Image (cartoon, rainbow, N blue to C red):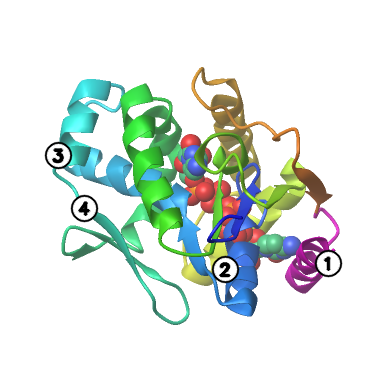
Amino acid sequence: MKEHIQIAIDGPASAGKSTVAKLVAKKLNYVYCDTGAMYRAITFEAMAKNISLDDDNELVNLLKKTTISFKPAVPEQLVFINDQDITQAIRQPEVTNNVSTVAAQGGVRQELVKRQQEIADAGSIVMDGRDIGTTVLPNAEIKIFLVASVKERALRRFKENQIKGIDTALDILELEIAERDRKDSTREISPLVQAKDAILVDTTSMNIEGVVQKIMEIINK
Ligand code: CDP
Ligand code: CDP
């Protein structure tokens, strides 16, 4: 019997993973871990330090000198690199459009997967990302693969950006999301793929509450 319960939520960009993972974690009183934020954090730091985004050795050297941490806060948890609050900075389009290049580097993934497994060792967890059910937590009790049509996902991100005051055209967002999915699904190491034992949930016509309810039903079964 495992000491802690693990819930893995994977899927393509803007499928709603982090929104529903956070809500499920809150309902269960589990820790929530946003692994995408960790890839975004090292991408942000590499860009700030002018490190080439496909130089795996340099990126790993940088990562080893870098603490990435989360702090609980309302309405969203804060993300820190060392002592710097980078919560907003890592959501900027420049980081979003570069993160898949960094996330394709084997050494970077190895180091971040190790840190993610250490976080999971500390207690029951809901973790979302691309390779949680396949690589990070292969023995997770519950694995969900969350999808939605690319049009719906672009629209969701568009509305989110409007609220945040980020100006982006819907058709460009759709292209960017499709390109990020392509890169994430075709990389050699831990590509975005549904784990064999993951349950597919298509959220195209579901609202946030509906998805949370569906996942809670799967957990309670
Ligand atoms: O929230 P959004 O779907 O835009 O992306 P994210 O979850 O913040 O992840 C950003 C990027 O990090 C993804 O496009 C992947 O390239 C990478 N990532 C990954 O490779 N493995 C993970 N477990 C999580 C994210
Ligand atoms: O983490 P991931 O990139 O998969 O997606 P997210 O950041 O959780 O969600 C992207 C946007 O879609 C957010 O603004 C959510 O509020 C919204 N969303 C939605 O409108 N309907 C859903 N069923 C799920 C998320």
Pick whichever, 15 or 5, lies toward us. 5
Question: Secondary structure beneath disc 4?
Answer: loop
Mark 1 or mark 2: which comes first in sequence?
2
Rendered residue at 69%/55% (across/down):
155
Give the extent of the magenta segment.
203-221
Q: Position of residue 52 (x, y in %)?
A: 23, 25
Mark whose residue sits in front, 1 or 2:
1
Q: Quadrant of residue 95?
A: top left
Q: Amino acid at mark 3?
A: Lys
In this view, the mark in front (3 or 2): 2
- Residue 24 visible from this viewpoint: yes
**Residue 67: mark:** 4
Q: Secondary structure at mark 3?
A: loop
- Residue shown at the point (64%, 34%) measured from the top left: 178
Is the residue marked by circle 2 packed among few (<14), some (14-19), or many (20+) residues within 10 Å? many
Question: Residue 22, which numbered label?
Answer: 2
Q: CA distance from mark 1 to mark 3?
A: 45 Å
- Give how far apart the Cα atoms at labels 1 and 4 are: 36 Å
Disc number lying in front (3 or 4): 4
Dot placed on the residue nearer the N-terminal end, 1 or 4: 4
Amino acid carrying label 1: it is: Glu
Q: Residue 57, image x and y in percent?
A: 21, 22
Label 1 element class: helix
Q: Name which quarter of the figure residue 77 lies in.
A: bottom left
